[in-house]
Image (cartoon, rainbow, N blue to C red):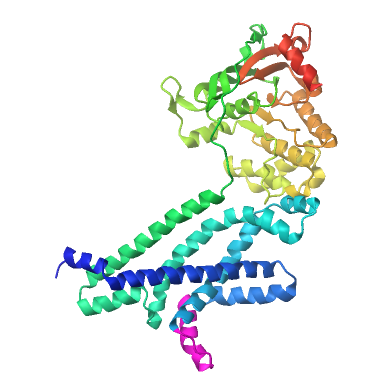
Amino acid sequence: MGFDTGIFLDILRSPLLLKAAWVTIWVAVVAQTIGTVLGFVLAGMLAAPKLLRWPALGFIWMFKGTPLLAQILFFYSALPQMGVPLSLIATGLLSLGLNEGARMADIVRGGLMSVSRDQREAGLALGLHHWQIFLKVVFPQAIRAIIPPLGNNFSYMIKATSLLAAISFAELLRVSQQLAQSTTRALEVYLAVALWYLVILTIWTLIQHRIEKAVALKTSSHVSAPPPIVERTVVRGDLGPDAPSRRCPVLEARNLTRSFGPIKGLDDVSLSVGRGEVVVVLGPSGSGKSTLLRALNWIEPADSGDVLLAGESLPWADAARRIARPEHMLDKRRRRLGMVFQSFALFPTMTARQNVALGPRTLLGIPKTQALAAADRLLDKVGLKDKLHSYPVELSGGQRQRVAIARALSMKPDAVLFDEPTSALDPESVGGVLGVMADLAGQGLTMVIVTHEIGFARRIADRIAYMERGRLLMDLPRDQAFGDDAPDYFGAFLSREG
C-alpha cells in the first residue's frame, strides 16, 4: 500500500488535527509561562540567603534529575493515590511547567549574571531602590541574554507536549495515533503530524527573531554625511636612504582606504615603519588613528590597499589579483604583530601569568612549564612579579594594561601596536604604563603608538604621524614635528591638546 497524496492532504486538513495543533500550542504557551515565572522566582531564591536558597536547589535537583515522562506519570497516577486527583489538563500543565521552571532557573540566573556589577552600582549611586534597579536597569539588559535560550526551550516545549500522549491527553501525537489506527494510513498520518510540528516551530522561530530584534541594543544605521574636507597640505619628511623605514621596513601600509557609509575612516593612507622605530600617531578623536592600527594587523580589513609585514603582504596571497590568504595563514602571520588595546582585553578567567602564557603554549607549542616561566619573566619585566596569580578583576587598570603589554610581547613579535593604551587609566597608572613603554622603546622594540599623550610622544617618538578625517597629513621626524617647520594645522592641534 503506497503513499496516497489525496489521503495525506485530507488528513493534513482534518479538523481533528487542527484542534490537536491548537491544543498543543496553548498547552505549550501556558506551560512555558508557568516555567518562566517559576524560573525567575527560583533564580531570585538562589541569590537569597540559605533559608531560601536550599529549597530552590532541592527543587532544581529533583526536577532536572528525573525524566519528564516519569514526572508526568507521577502527577497522573501517584498523586490521586495520595488523595490529590488532577484533571488531564492540570496534570499536563503542572508537570511541563514545573520541569521547565527548573531549567529556566539556570537560564534566568545566567542572564542576570551577564549584567555587570557596575550597572547595579550606577543605579545605587543614583539613589534607586533595589527593585527599581532590577526593573529599569538589570532586567532590560538580562532579557537580551535570556530570550535566545528561552526560545530554544519553548521549541522543546512544543515537542515535549507529545509526552502527554502517555496519559491520553489529546495533543497532536495522541490524535495522530488514533487516526493512524482508525484509518490504517500510518505513513500519511505521521507525515501530516510532522508537517504540523514543523509549521508551528517555523512560526515560533520567526516570532522569536522579531522579539530578539525588539529587545536588542538599538543602533543607528543612519550615518550623516561628513562636513566638507578642509584642504590641508600633506607634509612628509625627507627620510633619506639610510632611514630605518627605507633600509629595513618591518611594517608598511600602502594606500589603505576604509569607508563606513559616507565616512572615510581611512583615505589612501600609506605609512612605513622601520626596525626599531617608534612611530606615534596623533590626531583628534575620530580621525582614523585606531582604524589605521586595526587595519595594520587586518582586524579591520581595508576596502583597498595592502599591508606588508617584513616585505610580504599580510592579507593577500596575490595582492595584484586580490586573492586573500586562507584564514589560518593570516592568523599565523598576524602572530608576528602584537597589539595592546585601550580596554586591556585580558581574558577574565585566566590569571596574569596564564594570560601571558596562552599564546606561546597554544600557538607556538611551547611546553607549559617553559611558557609559564617565560610569562613570569615578562611580568617581572613590567613590574608585576607579585601579581602572577592575580586575576584581571583583582588588578588595577594600570596593572591590567601592563599584563596586556606582557602578553603582546610573549609572542616575540616583529612590532607592537598600541591603541591608546593609557586613555582608560587614572593619572597615577598612566605613568607606570608609559614607563614600561619607554623602556621597551629604549630596548629597540618596533612600535606604532596611537595616543593623546603629547609629552610622551615628544620624549620617545622617532617619528610623528598626524591624521585628520581619515587622511595621514603629516609624517615627520620628532624634532621637525615639534619644531618651527611643522604645518600650522599640527600646531593648532597641539594648542588644543594643551
**As rendered, which of 218 and 308 lies closer to the eye?**
218
In what quadrant of the picture does the N terminus appear? bottom left
Residue 240 in sight: yes
Vertical comparison of 68 with 138: above or below: below
Residue at x-position 69% and y-position 25% = 447
Vertical comparison of 244 with 367: above or below: above
Rendered image quadrant of residue 237: top right
Q: Position of residue 498 (x, y in %)?
A: 82, 21
Residue at x-position 61% and y-position 28% = 291
Q: Is residue 79 magenta?
A: yes
Question: In the rendered view, does 352 fall on the left or right side of 152?
Answer: right
SS assignment for the magenta stretch, majority = helix
Vertical comparison of 328 with 19: above or below: above
Figure label count:
0
Q: Position of residue 396 (x, y in %)?
A: 79, 44
Residue 67 in sight: no
Vertical comparison of 226 with 178: above or below: above
Residue at x-position 80% and y-position 20% = 459
**As rendered, which of 386 and 315 lies closer to the eye?**
315
Rendered image quadrant of residue 104: bottom right
Q: Is residue 481 magenta?
A: no
Q: Position of residue 495 (x, y in %)?
A: 79, 17
Question: In the rendered view, does 415 fall on the left or right side of 254?
Answer: right
Q: Which residue ends up furthest to the left in the rendered image? A: 1
**As rendered, which of 242 and 222 lies closer to the eye?**
222
The residue segment tinted magenta is 67-87
**As rendered, which of 412 and 235 lies closer to the eye?**
235
Q: Position of residue 188 (x, y in %)?
A: 23, 68
